């Protein structure tokens, strides 16, 4: 890998030597593989920025979407947009130059920030699922309890929780390393030290497994509640509402599960590395690309799947085309 143009590559070489010994790595990513990886991240980043811009524009412009119950979706879009800008720009540049370009401090800042934002998106989707359970359980009570202050506090809690989970690598429990793509940063899942391995296991549980289980359980309950409401409904308008709620819950569950499951290949890489099983670098790059691309695209799809967001853009497009026809 070309690191000759890097002013102080000692930390990078040190990372590589220790990681090679820990995971018995015998191959490195080729320049072509890095370019392909960079192109995939670039396309995902551009798509994410455009999609999040559309979602944020609808959330701010439409009065019905500025209610407290959509604050968590807003938190998801803002976090996703920040991730697209920060992660994609540095990773794409590194992929095309075939080296890590922002130094040791940049490595730690990048590793901490991207990891925090990824966990924020995971926990925010879990919080949205809990919110929908509350609405399905008792709509009247939920309408009173979903206030501006409580939703802002919930959004802040997702950031605090995520930051606390990712603080240990900055304080000496584990660390951030240049991963095997050569152009991205991750926590050190290749370490053979038992103390560091304990952190990796804890991270997998609290940042991946528990939110995924919570999301599946919440939306499963929502689907059951909607089905019961539909069975007891006698009015056609109520039946239509139940069908709409069911469709929204199914789409949200699918997108949330897709976001979590897209990290499954990378989680498998981590688990295999913990078991000291060598993973080919090409598989690592594919797993990383799937996880990072999903992180930049899936939350945007989550916001754009909201019925009121779609209705907002249908009305905008209808007015636009009506105006064009009137001019003609």
Image (cartoon, grey):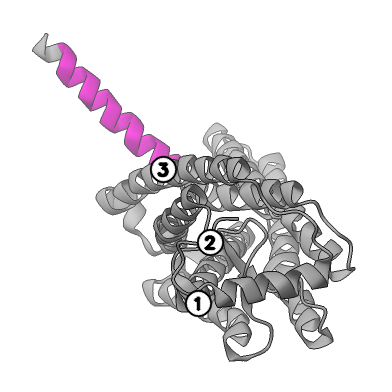
Location of residue 249 with respect to 191 vertically, above or below: above
- Which residue does the image show at 58% across and 47% down from the upper left? 34
- Which residue does the image show at 73% across and 75% down from the upper left? 18
Furthest residue to the left?
A: 327
Q: Which residues are magenta?
A: 306-325
> Of the residues under marks 1 and 2, which one precedes in the sequence?
2
- Which residue does the image show at 72% across and 72% down from the upper left? 17
Q: Quadrant of residue 31?
A: top right
Disc 3 crowd rating (10 Å Cα; few below 14, some 14-19, many 20+) is some
Furthest residue to the front?
A: 4
Nearer the camera: disc 3 or disc 2: 2
For the N terminus, give its image quadrant.
bottom right
**Residue 224 in view of the camera:** no
Q: Position of residue 83 (x, y in %)?
A: 46, 59
Q: Which element carries disc 3, helix, strand or loop?
A: helix
Along the horizontal axis of the image, is 106 left or right of 324?
Answer: right
For the residues marked 1 and 2, what is the alpha-carbon distance in whole angstroms?
A: 14 Å
**Residue 303 in view of the camera:** yes
Q: Which residue is mark 1?
A: 104
For the residues marked 3 and 2, what is the alpha-carbon distance in whole angstroms?
A: 27 Å
Location of residue 137 with respect to 170 vertically, above or below: above
Q: Which residue is mark 3?
A: 46
Q: Position of residue 163 (x, y in %)?
A: 54, 80
Nearer the camera: disc 1 or disc 2: 2
> Of the residues under marks 3 and 1, which one precedes in the sequence?
3
> Of the residues under marks 3 and 2, which one precedes in the sequence?
2
Q: Position of residue 61 (x, y in %)?
A: 25, 49
Q: Which element carries disc 1, helix, strand or loop?
A: helix
Disc 2 crowd rating (10 Å Cα; few below 14, some 14-19, many 20+) is some
Counting labels gives 3
Q: Which mark is residue 3?
A: 2
For the C terminus, give its image quadrant.
top left
């Amino acid at each position: 890998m070309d690191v000759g143009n890097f002013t102080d590559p000692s930390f990078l070489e040190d990372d590589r030597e220790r990681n090679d010994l820990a995971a018995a790595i015998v191959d490195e990513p080729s320049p072509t593989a890095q370019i392909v990886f960079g192109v995939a991240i670039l396309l995902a980043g551009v798509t994410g920025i455009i999609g999040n811009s559309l979602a944020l524009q609808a959330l701010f412009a439409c009065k019905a979407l500025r209610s407290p119950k959509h604050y968590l979706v807003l938190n998801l879009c803002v976090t996703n947009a920040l991730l697209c800008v920060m992660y994609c720009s540095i990773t794409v540049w590194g992929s095309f130059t075939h080296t890590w370009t922002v130094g040791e401090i940049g490595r730690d800042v990048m590793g901490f920030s991207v990891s925090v934002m990824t966990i924020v998106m995971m926990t925010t989707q879990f919080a949205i699922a809990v919110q929908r359970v509350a609405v399905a359980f008792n709509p009247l009570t939920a309408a009173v309890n979903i206030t501006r202050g409580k939703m802002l506090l919930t959004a802040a809690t997702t950031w605090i929780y995520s930051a606390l989970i990712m603080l240990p690598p900055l304080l000496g429990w584990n660390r951030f390393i240049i991963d095997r793509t050569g152009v991205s940063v991750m926590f050190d899942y290749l370490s053979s030290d038992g103390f560091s391995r304990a952190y990796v296991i804890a991270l997998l549980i609290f940042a991946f497994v528990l939110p995924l289980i919570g999301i599946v359980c919440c939306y499963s309950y929502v689907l059951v509640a909607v089905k019961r409401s539909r069975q007891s409904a006698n009015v056609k308008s109520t039946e239509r509402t139940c069908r709409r709620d069911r469709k929204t819950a199914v789409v949200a569950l699918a997108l949330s599960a897709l976001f979590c499951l897209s990290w499954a290949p990378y989680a498998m890489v981590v688990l295999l590395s913990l078991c000291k099983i060598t993973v080919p670098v090409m598989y690592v790059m594919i797993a990383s690309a799937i996880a990072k691309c999903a992180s930049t695209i899936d939350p945007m799809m989550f916001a754009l799947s909201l019925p009121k967001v779609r209705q907002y853009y249908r009305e905008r497009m209808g007015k636009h085309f009506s105006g064009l026809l009137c001019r003609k």
